[in-house]
Amino acid sequence: MSSRPAASTPYIAALQGGMVGRSGVTVSSSDRSRALEAEYRALEAAAVGQPIQWTGRGVSGQVTAAAPYQVGSQNCRQYKHTINADGRDVIARGTACRNKDGTWTPLI
């Protein structure tokens, strides 16, 4: 078992299901957590275009974030989440903005 704390539980919750939740792909709750953590890591710290990969049971994906930009006082990033399930890729795109508390909120 990992000694790492549940990395970003409030941060992951703030993503409101993320792009994986809007992709139409059915994933287990543990795989959803992996996917959401990858979305958070891509938004928070990944270099522009650097894919953040995740792997689950029979499903995998990668999240790639674009350059950050300002909207008012918030930093925002567009991102793409490619999910591979059942041998096919599903691509979901979105934008999220960073809140003062460090969470990211998707723009819907």
Image: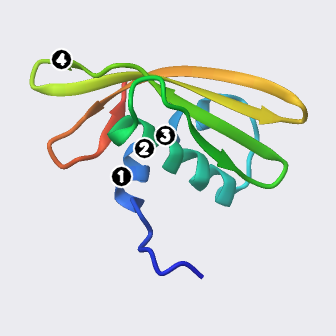
Q: Amino acid at mark 1?
A: Tyr
Q: Residues within 10 Å of mark 2 (few under 14, many from 20)?
A: many
Q: Are marks 4 and 2 in contact (CB under 8 Å)?
A: no
Q: Secondary structure at mark 4?
A: strand
The reply to whether discs 2 and 3 touch (Cβ–Cβ < 8 Å) is yes
Identify which amino acid the numbered label 4 is placed on.
Val
Task: Say whether residue 64 is left or right of residue 78.
Answer: right
Q: CA distance from mark 4 to mark 1?
A: 20 Å
Is residue 108 visible to the viewer in this orientation of the structure?
A: no
Q: CA distance from mark 4 to mark 3?
A: 20 Å
1 or 3: mark nearer the eye? 3
Q: Tell me the tag on residue 39.
A: 3
Q: Is 8 above or below relative to 86? A: below
Which circle's residue, 2 or 1, is located before the other in the chain?
A: 1
Residue 71: mark in rendering: 4
Mark nearer the viewer, 2 or 1? 2
Q: Residue at x 21, y 27 (%)?
A: 75
**Secondary structure type for disc 3:** helix
- For marks 1 and 3, the one nearer the N-term is 1
Q: Amino acid at mark 3?
A: Glu
Disc 4 versus disc 2: distance between alpha carbons? 19 Å
Report, in whole angstroms, how far the alpha carbon at label 2 lies from the one at label 1. Answer: 7 Å
Which residue is disc 2 drawn over? 40
Q: Position of residue 25 (x, y in %)?
A: 75, 35
Q: Are marks 4 and 3 in contact (CB under 8 Å)?
A: no
Q: Residue at x 11, y 18 (%)?
A: 72
Q: Earlier in the sequence, mark 4 or mark 2?
A: 2
Q: Which mark is residue 33?
A: none
Please state the horizontal and vertical placement of residue 52, each as a whole percent of the image: 54, 39
